[in-house]
Image (cartoon, grey):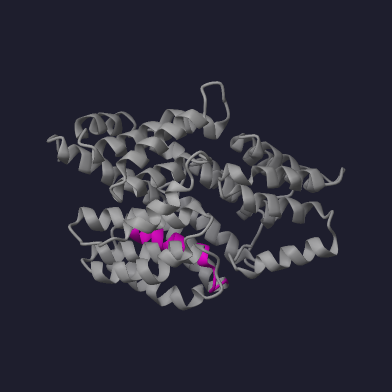
Amino acid sequence: MLAHRREAAHHLASALLADPEAVPALVLQGFGLRKLARRDRFAAIEGVLARCPPTDQPRDRALFEALAAWLADDGPGAADRLDAQLTSDPRDLLVMKLAHGVRFMLGDSRGMLRSVERVVAAHDETDANFGFLLGCHSFALEENGSYEAAERAGRRGLELEPNDVWGAHAVAHVMFMQKRHDEGARWLHAFSPRLDGCTNLAGHVYWHEALCLHELGRSDEALDLLDQRIGPYLDADYRDLSNAVSLLFRLQRAGVDVGDRWGRYADFAFEREGDHGSAFADVHYALALAGAGRVEDAARFVASMAAARAAADLGFDATVMREVGVPLATAIVDLYTGRASEADRVFRALSAEVQRIGGSHAQRALVSWIAAAAAESAGDVQP
């Protein structure tokens, strides 16, 4: 799990075959479903929780309660429950990794750093898996703007765990944020052989390489990565689509002919209408539809977003969807239907709120790119 290897799923299945009531294994299965941010998976998560036997083991109870909270749309409560367990046992890297992932999806970069630093303080380099821990620390530092410390932690982590894809990805984030695009492209290309056997995180790492190549004016190579290394991962995980459409928008905005590539991503987004489990995902789905020229489908998708999360729903994701996701997606549709001035107004009003949809600074930079396109179309380009 720490290494983001595909065989983790097989080990989990074997554990559940050996002990169908193993609470940690059941809860890990539930977390795997919940991170997809798809409401059509919620019934399966309820089934996982129902299979968990009563337990008086503090760790098992903490895992169970965290998953139950996240299922109930209390992501902050889930993360807090995991962090409370880390206070009791800061050496538990499994709980650390779960807390790290939940806070990342919440856009809580400060909480992510506080959580992982508690664990780092309880370890040293002689401990097993310390390299993976440094990779998580590196990413949390980067998301909080501590670039030099992040790079040091990431590079040291890779010395200890050369195959740590999350740590390599964290160092790439630093290079991208510092506009070291040539170095970033070379760093990621050198690491790419180690992505064999990785989960779909591999597609996201290739996305970072493609962004660097695009910034260097090597857009043909970026398109090749999209076709051969990023697009093939398109499956149940919204992040696979977000990688692709984010890259497509940047390329098209720069005048690159992307052909008919928007089409398959629009088809995928169309299937998600009515689900709406994540504002981050839905903003990218709306862009996929609008980018493919299916503006009526995009408008209907946005209306479905608003309807799915009624004002009476006070959960975390529901609130972020109403207050940030729906307006951002509406602005995207406005841009593609000739209402650039209205889109520009919304993007400006929400500029300080975008982090609430989750993801990284590099991922959310897409919103800035779309906002810039709206400002330009509205004739109000800022320096």
Q: Does the magenta stretch include residue 168?
A: yes
Q: Position of residue 293 (x, y in %)?
A: 28, 48
Taking depth in this image into account, of 113 and 303 the one nearest to the observer is 303
Taking the image as drawn, is residue 127 in sight? no
Up the image or down, 307 lies above or below 120; here it is above
- Residue that appears at 51% across and 63% down: 200
Q: Position of residue 344 (x, y in %)?
A: 23, 33
Residue at the limit of the structure toward the left, as seen here? 379
18 sits left or right of 112 in the view = right
Residue at the limit of the structure toward the top, as seen here? 312
Q: Where is residue 164 in the image (x, y as percent from the top left)?
A: 54, 68
Quarter of the figure with the N terminus: bottom right
334 sits left or right of 321 in the view = left
Quarter of the figure with the C terminus: top left
Which range is magenta?
161-176
Q: Position of residue 111 (x, y in %)?
A: 54, 41
Taking the image as drawn, is residue 197 in sight? yes
